[in-house]
Amino acid sequence: MTLRFEFRPYRAALREPLRTARGLRTERDGVLIRFTDENGATSLGEIAPLAEWGSETLDDAVAFCAALPAEFDAGQMRAIPDALPCCQFAFETALAALTRPAAPSPLRNLPIAALLPAGAAALKALEAAAARGYATFKWKIGVGPAAEEIGLLAHLFDRLPRGGRLRLDANGGLDLPSAELWLKACEGRPVEFLEQPFPVGREEAIIRLAHEYTTRLALDESVARPADLLRWLEFGWPGIYVIKPSLAGSPARLARRLLEYEAECVFSSALETAVGARAALLFAAAQVADERALGFGTVACFADEALNLHAPAPTIATKWLARLETGPLWDHCPNLLRTA
Ligand code: MG
């Protein structure tokens, strides 16, 4: 099958700067791709690289797209190098959207975790999100001094709704003593997991901690690159895998691996526009269903509303997602470059 291929880079400001242990992010750039078949049907895909997470850079992605002919043979899909995982995701999902137009399978209401800001601002944010019906709350930690943040933890627990749970995401910002302080503070409390306590490549202590404390541990940055994910799967990581589908390479290969290793997963966004977020959510919905909330608290992260998938809500229905028309974003894209 031969398709017409086009691409458009974008750059867009975030509504609120995102502060994590890795610093402050104020904008995101990426590339939209479009396939058109011989009948004029079109589909979009999104390349949303985060090079600091080990994906290709934006320049790599643009160079790859620029080198492709305008006529794309669907058979070339397999030839996209593993060094371009975000391109693999974008091309494969765009092709699937064209050849298997969205049947919402399975029909589910996907629970979404609310993202809380770092520091004391989390208290009010948790109250507001709980009032809107959220039950899972993700708090970025390792941003301020550990003692101060742990001091806030009890106040967050007090504000949790009945049955509510906290996820703590350190983005690699802890050392061993502070990780143990956090885990002690979490013992017996409604903490779903502590995510990525240590930086990539410095995870030695994490296996011991996973066995010594009752709070579950999760890996995110450590498993963001497909080769690293495979390494941890082979190793038999006893904790949870946080998977960002749009960084994880070929979705078909990812689905096979997660199933083969019976990985316990939480799926999460990588600050995509509606195009990538929709594809990532539909991928997540199609994997083995458990009731863990999806880490898509950033679906409305862009200042430009037209880019956002959804107003933040405690659930997203796969039926709605499947029907969602992202095509208009293609024509919106040049505006983004102008205003960036
Ligand atoms: Mg994370």
Image: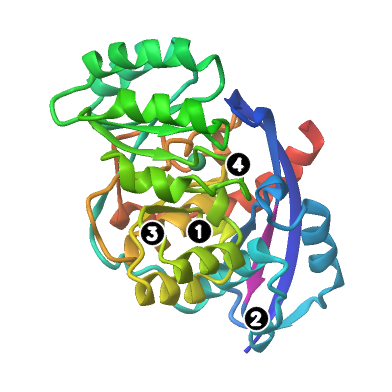
Rendering quarter of residue 161: top left
Q: Are marks 4 and 2 in contact (CB under 8 Å)?
A: no
Q: Earlier in the sequence, mark 3 or mark 2?
A: 2
Which SS class for mark 2? helix
- From the image, state whether disc 3 or disc 4 is nearer to you: 4
* Residue that mark 2 sits on: 77
- Assess disc 3: are there few (<14), some (14-19) or many (≥20) residues with their C-alpha within 10 Å of its C-alpha: many
Is residue 318 depicted above or below 101 in this figure? Answer: above
The residue under label 1 is which amino acid type?
Answer: Pro
* Residue that mark 1 sits on: 245
The residue under label 4 is which amino acid type?
Answer: Pro
Q: Earlier in the sequence, mark 4 or mark 1?
A: 4
Task: Give percent across and percent down for residue 51.
Answer: 72, 49
Q: Is mark 3 within 8 Å of ligand 1?
A: no
* Residue that mark 3 sits on: 284
In-image side of 259 versus 28 (left or right): left
The label shown at residue 199 is: 4
Residue sitting nearer the eye, 142 or 247: 142
